[in-house]
Amino acid sequence: MFTQRPLGEAGLTYIRERLDGGLTPAQHLLQVLPTEQGQAVTYLPAWVPDTYATDFEGAWGILTDPAVHQQDPILDLYLFLRDVIRTFL
């Protein structure tokens, strides 16, 4: 199943950089989003190494890489997201 992984300051910096390079809605969000008071997290399967969680440029596609993906062949992201969304409703 998926586990929550904190991304720390590296995650917040990545989010700020992506918003800074975006169009008007992203620029507005960057101005009003208090990122210095928040935290960034992601949800990944338990078998994904922590180093991949913060490798924002090099680890793309880790969940589709057959050599890695065979460790957990059935990932039902739909069910996971459904459960996460229900906690907000």
Image: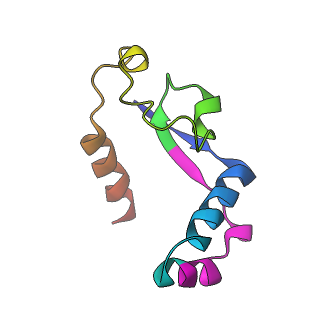
Residue 60, how many percent across, how many down? Answer: 48, 38
Pick the front one: 68 or 21: 21
Residue sitting nearer the eye, 42 or 13: 13
| Percent position of residue 58, x then y | 57, 36
Side (left or right) of 23 relative to 7? left
Q: Nearer the viewer, residue 81 or 29?
A: 29
Name the colouring of the figure. rainbow
| Residue 29 falls in image quadrant | bottom right
> Residue shown at 61%/72% (left/top)?
20
Question: Which residue lies at the image location 35% right of the left edge and 18% below the top edge?
Answer: 66
Which residues are the magenta region? 27-42
Q: Is residue 34 magenta?
A: yes
Asked if 36 appears above or below 24 in the picture, the reply is above
The answer to which image quadrant residue 88 occupies is bottom left
Q: Residue 19's image quarter?
A: bottom right
Q: Is residue 46 above or below residue 53?
A: above
Vertical side of 86 occupied by 57: above or below: above
Image quarter of the C terminus: bottom left
Tell how many labels: 0
Residue 81 x %, y %: 32, 49
Which x, y percent locates residue 11? 65, 52
Q: Is residue 29 magenta?
A: yes
Q: Is residue 11 above or below residue 56?
A: below
**Location of the N terminus (image quadrant):** top left
